[in-house]
Amino acid sequence: MRRCLALLSVGLLAGCGSSAQLGAVQLVPNTPPAVAPAGDITWFLDSEPLTLDTDYHGATTEDTVVANLCDRLYQLQPDLTVRPWLVEEPAMPDPTTFVYRVRDGVRFHDGSTVTAEDVAFSLRRHAEDGNDESDEFGNVESIDVTGPMEVTVRLEEPDAQFKYRMAGDAGIVLNAGLVNRLGDDFGSPGRPDACSGPYYLDRWDAGDSLTIKRFPDYWNAELRPLTESIRFVWGDEWAAVNSLRTGAADGAYLDDPSMAPALSTSPELSLHFGLTTSAWQLIPTDRGPMSDVRLRTALSLSLDRQGMAEAAFRGAAEPWKLPVGAGTFGTGKALFEQAYQQIRDVPIRPGEQDLARARELVREAGPPSEPIVVANDGTAVGNVLANGVRDAGLKLGLPVEIRTVPPAQFSELFASPEARAGVDLLVNDWYLSKPDGLGMYDNVLPDSVNNYLNFRDEQYESTFASAAATYDDLQRARQVIRLQDEYLEHMLSIPLVMAPTTLAMSNRLTGAPVSSAYLTYPWAADLGRRS
């Protein structure tokens, strides 16, 4: 079996085979199709899920599991296109109305039938204030059952992104009766899932493992899993390396791509690299020095992004100018690539840093009265990137304090204003569940739960509205490019690096997708043996 681990001059890992390319980098959406059952396998996660209720908390760990349990209205494909799934292609009597026909014959894991009432309940629940997906519904005027298997969603304004929203966690359809019966216990260990996907939750032994099993009555013949069950275990990055190398785990989507070199020498493993919608970045808050755009821009101008990529990812990442990955470029790829080359204030090569201008911005803003607090999750990548920020701060006379937060508590910084009250910057790999940059740029709209800066700007909101209302893909790409320019003008987050989606898997297995679609696509359903 051929393994592929080629470090390119641009700093990225090349995939074995290609269906997408950015510069010299070749990435694949899928591994070759499986042809035989795989039985029971063990899969490694970077941490234990906090919950399986993505309305409460949906991050990489949780989504890796939930993607196999829960169907959505639309389904994101490994090639980062979307298609209708639990519903037929909607009728659109006007640009702000979507009339969905719910598919017949779909059953939840408890045997009950998926109804229009379940769909409407789920969308309304996702839209509730404070829930993780609520910002996806800021433009929704009403969600109504309008027929026996029909749901109508009316928007306040046209929204070309809405189909992508319905392929993410905002489109998950839940069993309304079961969720209501479980109440606050829904999503916790010892409780069933409330979904209709190709796998169901078999057991969750808190602190030890979580197992999902093939659902025998799955409605869609296109997804007939070859793998009987997946047992999820978890630990830090070196536990992952040891488990994969010894065969204790059969595979993992690596949260830390810098582990790839340590795995590349194992004759029992294959490494695969795919297109991603995500980028590592610094997420600012409004509590202290980083609320000043001049200091955010000064810091961006001073960062050694290539050095950070090499130190944190051992060359398995590319210094990057955008808060979104290249997987968001879509049909406007040529336009986005051209615009990318013209981005200012985000130097990506040694010697491009503009320290003179950065120091002038610091003088204009005035020295902060307290250190800039940078929080990271304590992983090797998080620590290295945080230290890169401190090094840049030293060049400008800006004191930087690093605060290390364990991964389980780090996620609370995004959910709780109280938890991040003493933090100025969050080091984070922000992924999108939809292949459209608007999914990042809407995080700083006034009604977004992720607008940690409390940013408001009429011009930005107007540009976003124009892009969101443009259904033609190429025209929308031009609007999004204008929006990303405004985003970076305000430096609403500070881009750092882009790392490919990285899959490490036993040589006996194949079929799993490699792109970042695995976070919402039921990847385990494609997994099986090579022969």
Image: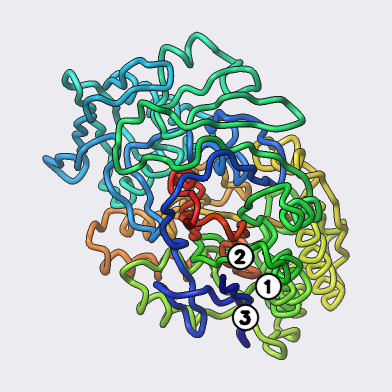
Number of numbered callouts drawn? 3
Left or right for 365, reference 10: right
x 39%, y 25%: residue = 122
Considering only vertical position in the picture, is 108 above or below 496?
above
Instruction: Say which of 389 and 40 sits in front.
Output: 40
Q: Earlier in the sequence, mark 2 or mark 3?
A: 3
Residue 489 seen in the current view: yes
Find residue 300 and name its label.
1
Q: Nearer the viewer, mark 3 or mark 1?
A: 3
Find residue 270 and name its label.
2
Within 10 Å of disc 2 (Cα), the crowding (few <14, some 14-19, many 20+) is many
Considering only vertical position in the picture, is 38 above or below 217?
below
Alpha carbon distance from label 2 to label 1: 36 Å
Q: Earlier in the sequence, mark 2 or mark 1?
A: 2
**Which residue occupies the extreme top position in the image?**
181
Residue 441 seen in the current view: no
Q: Amino acid at mark 3?
A: Ala
